[in-house]
Every structure is written in structure tokens, then in C-alpha cells.
Image: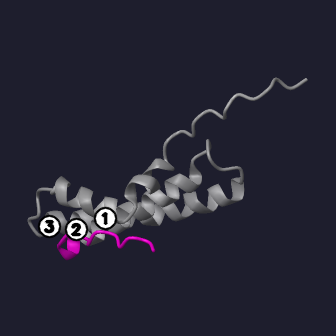
Amino acid sequence: MTPEPPPLPALTRSEGELVDRYLEAVDLLGRINPSRTTDTYAALRAAQALVSRAVALKDALTVMHMRGETELHHGTLGRALRVLDGERRSGLVTVAPEPAAGPPEE
């Protein structure tokens, strides 16, 4: 039986939008990462989609700023990201580790 994930912390609508848009952008960056992908067409499609996701992320932050939400509560937002598998998802953006050394090819 799979344990139930912890509950998502209470977020404002704007904070929820920020987290969602951020994770969308991270997912696309992971698909573009040249150390992890082998398909140029898939990376191209992800890069094209990233443009609109970056605009949506900017818009989410703009709304927060315009509403007077001038601080990001990183503790709460960090918990939300962890609940939504943000650590694994953002890990796909980093450079992939070197493959394990095998026997030399001849």
C-alpha cells in the first residue's frame, strides 16, 4: 500500500498559480536538458512551449505583486513544491551524471 502524500499547505490562489506555473516551466526545462534528452524534435517542442509557460509564470508573479503580495513565503512554497514532487522534477534540469565507467571498448 502506497503511503498517502502529506497534504498541500494552505496557499493563496496567487501562490498556487505561481507554484503550478513554476513546475510547468521546470518540467519543460527538464525535457529540453541536452544532457538528458536524445530527441531534438521533442526538445524543440518543449522549448516552444516554454515561451508561453514563462509568460504565465511572469503573469502569476505580476498578479501577486499588484495585489500587494510582496514577499514569497519560501517555507510554505517549498513544502508545496515538495508535496508536488518538485525535487524530482527540478532534478531533471541539472546536468545528468556521468555514465558509470564500463570496460573499455576496442
Identify the residue under disc 2. Answer: 15
In the rendered structure, which disc, 1 or 3, sits on the residue that comes first in sequence? 1
Task: Say if 68 sits above or below 34 in the image.
Answer: below
Quadrant hosting residue 61:
bottom left
Rendering coords of residue 58 (x, y %): 31, 61
Q: Is 90 on the left or on the right of 34, as rendered?
A: left
Kindly identify the amino acid type of the residue bearing the numbered disc 2: Glu
User: Marks 2 and 3, Cα distance to the nearest angstrom?
Assistant: 13 Å
Q: Secondary structure at mark 3?
A: helix
Q: Is residue 92 visible?
A: yes
The residue at 57%/61% (across/down) is 46
Q: Which residue is mark 1?
A: 19
Work out how far the residue at label 1 is from the one at label 3, CA to CA, in angstroms: 17 Å
Query: In terms of depth relative to the viewer, which is nearer, 56 or 73?
Result: 73
Q: Could you say where residue 65 lies in the image, as x and y percent from the top left? A: 15, 63
Considering the image in quadrants, where does the C terminus appear? top right
Q: What is the span of residues highlighted in magenta in the rendered image?
A: 1-14
